Each structure stands twice: as structure tokens, then as C-alpha cells.
């Protein structure tokens, strides 16, 4: 890895000091993460492809960055853990390349470390992607009257969301493997995107971490909901993984998320405290 390269488990950790750097990120390659990379004036960015997924949401930002002249690529979610830049550097294999990165010699199948070295030669983009706001919505389930919090990123969860049903667009892997970053509040229910990892416990590590905090947590399949889009998770998401507490609350793999949530009743949501 060159001295220009920087490891960030989450692209939300960018700041104004990173202009001109090549960043290896643990974040997915959707539009919002790409907008942050663009706003930080990075030279180039490497994201996780999050299984590419529904409507190619996992790499939409990688491709969009070519429109403003920024080199970007994504690594195969099955080659390394999402949420871990160090694992991406150690084991990541490139899966998707935009046209600017391709001109620098980056190709699918290339090791992330080699790709980062090639991207040190990338041109500095002079334009930026439009600023994208991640959104937070609240709604009431018609059948049960239970309230939902829908956030495109788990970073938007607040302490006031304790004991609420929280649907996020974020991936289900601990950021940097840190259990303290599983969720900012002890929600009653927490929902994440599986980001292409449906069998590896390490790849859905927020779920057991939230079991330890008494939170019912599930992931929805990346093939059924756009990563980074909580409304998509609610409207079309199908459950792909459940933790122990969610199973006790009636969640089942293959069940549409909306159906499970509509079946919940205040009295039927197990008090895990």
C-alpha cells in the first residue's frame, strides 16, 4: 500500500484532511457513500460491492463517480468483510471498476492492495457528485399501531430510538468488528441489509452482538432491497438472517419483513431486558 492510501472502516469517517488520498473503505459502494468520497476530494475510493444487489445499489456510487472524473472500484463481498478496511486490504478482490479506475489499470480480479497502488496515479477530480442527504422517516403500522423508524444509515439512529422498531439501510456487519458500533440505541427491533453475506456469521456480526443487548435483529436479502435505502427494506425486503431474540419474536428466514412486522403486537414483542 502506498503512503497516499488510507484505511477507513466507514466512509462516514472522512474529513477535510483527506484530499488527494486513495481510500480503502469498508462501506458499500452506493450513492450516498460515493457522495461523501466526492465531497472529501479523495483521489480514488475502493468500496465493498455489498453483493451488488437489488437494482445494483451496492455499486451505484462507484459507477456514478466516473461522471465527475473520480476513480472508483468495488471489491467482491465474498472476498473480504464489509465494514473492515483492513480485511479489504488483506484479502479483497476487485469486482467492479468504473471507467476512470480502468484507465489507471485496475481490473476485476485484481487484489485490492495492487489496485490501491494503481489508483495512486489517478487524476484528481475537479467536479463533485451532488450532495445526498440520508433520510429518516417515521411511520405507523396500520394493523398494529406500532411505530417504525426508517433510517438510510444506522448512523442516524439516536438514543431516543431505544425500544423502538428501527429499520436501517446499513449492512449487518460490525464496523471494524467493534460491538459498540452495532447500533446507537437498544432498539426493540433492528433491521439491516445482508450486503451479500447470507451464511457467514462474521458477515452478519451485528446480529449476535445485538442478541447480547437484548435486541431482536434481522437482515433482509440484498437481492430484495436496495442497500442504503430503509424504505426499500420495509417495502420489498425478505428476511435472510435472524438472531435468537428475533426468532423468539416470530421472525423466519424467507418471510417478507413487512409481514413479520405487521404480525408483531406490543404484548407479543418479548421483553428481553
Image (tube, grey):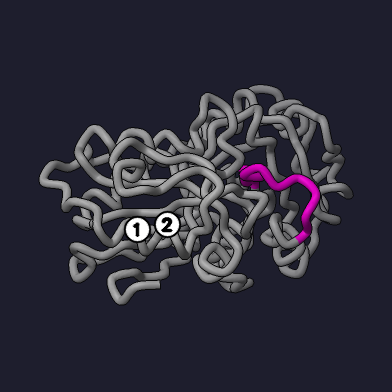
**Magenta-drawn stretch contains 238:** no
Residue displayed at 59% across by 47% down: 76
Residue displayed at 32% across by 56% down: 119
Query: In the visual, does 18 lie left or right of 81?
Result: left
Q: Which mark is residue 115?
A: 2
Contact, mark 1 vs mark 2 (Cβ under 8 Å): yes
Question: Label 2's element?
Answer: helix
Answer whether residue 89 is visible to the viewer in this image.
yes
* Residue 25: percent from left, percent from top: 44, 60
Answer whether residue 33 is visible to the viewer in this image.
no
Q: Quadrant of the N terminus?
A: bottom left
Query: In the visual, does 197 lie left or right of 12?
Result: right
Q: Which mark is residue 118?
A: 1
Q: Quadrant of the C terminus?
A: bottom right
Question: Label 1's element?
Answer: helix
Residue displayed at 55% across by 60% down: 83
Work out which residue is located at the far left of the displayed protein and give it.
126
**Residue stretch rendered in magenta on the structure:** 191-201
Amino acid at each position: 500500500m502506498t503512503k497516499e492510501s488510507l484505511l477507513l472502516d466507514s466512509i462516514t469517517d472522512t474529513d477535510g484532511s483527506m484530499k488527494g488520498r486513495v481510500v480503502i473503505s469498508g462501506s458499500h459502494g452506493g450513492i450516498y457513500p460515493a457522495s461523501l468520497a466526492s465531497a472529501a476530494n479523495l483521489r480514488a475510493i475502493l468500496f465493498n460491492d455489498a453483493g451488488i444487489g437489488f437494482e445494483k445499489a451496492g455499486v451505484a456510487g462507484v459507477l456514478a463517480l466516473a461522471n465527475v472524473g473520480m476513480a472508483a472500484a468495488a471489491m467482491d463481498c465474498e472476498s473480504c468483510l464489509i465494514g473492515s478496511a483492513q480485511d479489504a486490504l488483506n484479502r479483497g478482490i476487485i469486482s467492479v471498476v468504473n471507467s476512470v479506475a480502468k484507465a489507471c489499470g485496475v481490473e476485476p480480479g485484481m487484489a485490492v492492495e495492487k489496485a490501491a497502488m494503481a489508483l495512486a496515479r489517478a487524476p484528481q477530480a475537479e467536479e463533485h457528485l451532488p450532495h445526498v442527504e440520508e433520510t429518516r422517516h417515521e411511520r405507523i403500522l396500520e394493523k398494529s399501531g406500532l411505530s417504525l423508524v426508517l433510517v438510510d444509515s444506522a448512523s442516524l439512529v439516536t438514543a431516543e430510538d431505544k425500544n423502538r422498531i428501527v429499520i436501517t439501510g446499513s449492512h449487518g456487519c460490525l464496523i471494524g468488528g467493534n460491538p459498540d458500533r452495532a447500533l446507537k440505541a437498544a432498539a426493540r427491533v433492528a433491521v439491516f441489509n445482508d450486503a451479500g453475506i447470507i451464511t457467514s456469521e462474521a458477515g452478519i456480526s451485528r446480529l449476535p452482538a445485538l442478541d447480547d443487548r437484548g435486541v431482536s435483529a434481522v437482515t433482509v436479502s440484498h437481492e430484495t432491497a436496495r442497500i442504503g435505502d430503509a424504505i426499500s427494506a420495509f417495502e420489498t425486503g425478505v428476511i435472510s438472517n435472524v438472531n435468537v431474540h428475533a426468532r423468539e419474536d416470530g421472525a423466519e428466514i424467507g418471510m417478507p419483513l413487512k409481514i413479520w412486522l405487521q404480525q408483531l403486537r406490543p404484548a407479543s414483542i418479548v421483553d428481553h431486558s
